[in-house]
Amino acid sequence: MQPVLKRLTPLWLALGIGGLLVSGVVRLLQGQFDAYAQGSLALGLVSFALALILNRDEAQTWLGGRQARYGGNTLLMTVAFVAIVVMINYLVVKNPMQWKTRWDLTEEQTNTLAPETLEAIKQLPAPVKAVGFYTGNFASSQSTAQELLDNYKAESGGRFTYEFHDPNSDPVLAKEYNITRDGTLVLSMGDQKEELNFATEQEITGALVRFAHPGKRVIYFLTGHGEKDIAAGGDNSLSGGVDLLKKQNYDIQPLNLQVTTTVPSDARAVVIAGPQVPVTADEVTVLGNYLRYNANSALIVMLDPPIQTQAQPDEADPLVDYLNARWGINVQRDLVVDFSNSYPQQPLFPLNKGYEASPITDKLLGISTMFPIARSIVVTGTAETFPDITYSPLVKTDDGAWGETDVNSLSSAAGPTLGEGDDPGPLYLAAAAENRTDKSRMVVFGDADFASDAKFADQSLYNLGANANLFVNSVNWATTEENLLNLTLKTPTSRSLQVVDNVTVVVIGLITVIGMPVLVLVLGGVMWFQRRRHT
């Protein structure tokens, strides 16, 4: 029986090579090492083992030959070199503080902290500790954060430390830090704490600057017109978003301009969150004077469509008129309808199709935001009409959306359709503006529900997708203390291989992963047979 099996040695070798090739191809095409890939790999290894067992004498002769000795020496040297490199990297990573000199060989110096960050670290009056809470779902984010925090630790001279915890494995610590969101980084210095949703150099250094300059940052929320409540929970509440702001050391206060005729001088921003009746002309005048005569002042306006408010259909809205006349931002009297890119079976709940470039949205790319029952925003200002104002549209709808002006069509049997007087998509749902002369800033949303505690899909809207981050980022941008922090941001050079289609990806993978190694084996076999024939 054994001689018969021995004569089948070429078959075992072919099965061995074929099994390994099939295993590699399946792994490459499916992106996972499933049962088919495992079975093919097992077949290949077993076939190679049979070929060696049935040809022990030939294998021993070959292993005792000069070529095998040379190959074994080369393999041993390669393994030793790789082991040394791995050990050196391990020692450097585990003991970064023991290495006095650090090199950043990247073209854009991506592993080097900005000069402003280094200065902020020097000005720290006390040690800072960073505690990150990341589950396995945020493993990639934790890895990125750790690389950045390593740089802070290396440059701090022992004044900056960090640690990571899984909030699911350590719920007591997570409760102690009041953690409600995965991927949260908490910085603390003494009694001061700041909670960050994004571990970026700009966010971390901003917190360090605020630690060194603990000025009061007060945000006032306008009241008296049926606005979203900032305290109690419920559908008409902003308590979730307000809690996030408080964790970033904002002091949240109500403001009733029917009681006082001025905006307090310590106001870093005023938020108008979904008034049910129009803000009066006198109040708008007060708000306009606040923006005009107070440096670094800001206004965040969130206006629901008229159909959601108690305003009369043709009632004037002094705030909308002010935004259009003095800022070149027109809040439309329409209702955004989107059948192609909205929450399932909810065409009045559009999802964003994309974000425009802005510090408010640059961290939200690829994360959806939803705007239940929204109106559109149109930037009417130009460089000629408003030369001192810079505009940044923020959130854009799908091309198939439109601004419906006929509210009665919503209840008709045919449903709403794009008709005369409606604005076709894409539409903007939010926009930001900055007056370069008086340093005031404005953020306008065509919806207030997106940041509310109202329950939808078994969770509050502010915690749905990037809704909460969009709201908090808007406040952060509006209140940025740029006199304290202006990081020299790095613009990475984009280098990417433009792949036409999936076939190209597969071909490239086959050539690099399978083709080239097989070619090396074939050439080695040809050389071996040539040398053996001449000996």
Image: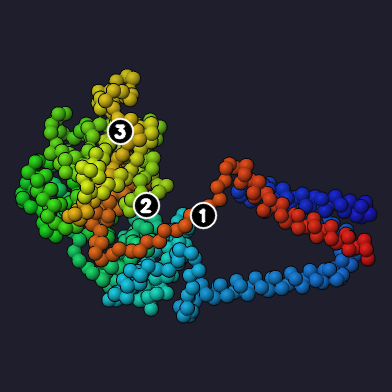
Residue 299 visible in rendering: yes
Q: In this view, does 204 lie to the left or right of 320?
A: right
> Looking at the image, is 388 positioned above or below residue 131?
above
- Residue depicted at 57% across the width and 75% down the height: 88
* Residue beneath disc 2: 362
Query: Is 196 or 422 nearer to us in this picture?
Result: 422
Query: For mark 3, does the 10 Å Cα neighbourhood hold few (<14), some (14 to 19), or many (20 or more) residues?
Result: many
Which three-letter amino acid code belongs to the residue tagged 3?
Val
Give percent across and percent down for residue 149: 41, 68
Give percent across and percent down for residue 492: 45, 58
Residue 226 visible in rendering: no
Q: For residue 529, which quarter of the picture?
A: bottom right
Q: Which of the two marks, 1 or 3, is nearer to us in this view?
A: 1
Which three-letter amino acid code belongs to the residue tagged 2?
Asp
> Looking at the image, is 436 positioned above or below residue 499?
below
- Sequence-first tag of 2 and 1: 2
Q: State the residue lying farthest toward the front.
A: 384
Q: For residue 370, which quarter of the picture?
A: top left
Query: For mark 2, does the 10 Å Cα neighbourhood hold few (<14), some (14 to 19), or many (20 or more) residues?
Result: few
- Which mark identifies residue 495? 1
- Residue depicted at 59% across the width and 42% down the height: 502
- Residue depicted at 88% across the width and 60% down the height: 530
* Residue beneath disc 3: 336
Query: Is 439 or 87 nearer to us in this picture?
Result: 439
Which three-letter amino acid code belongs to the residue tagged 1?
Arg
Q: In this view, does 121 lie to the left or right of 534?
A: left
As helix, strand or loop, the secondary structure at mark 2 comes to: loop
Chosen colour scheme:
rainbow
- Sequence-first tag of 1 and 3: 3
Give percent across and percent down for residue 417: 33, 24
- Sequence-first tag of 2 and 3: 3
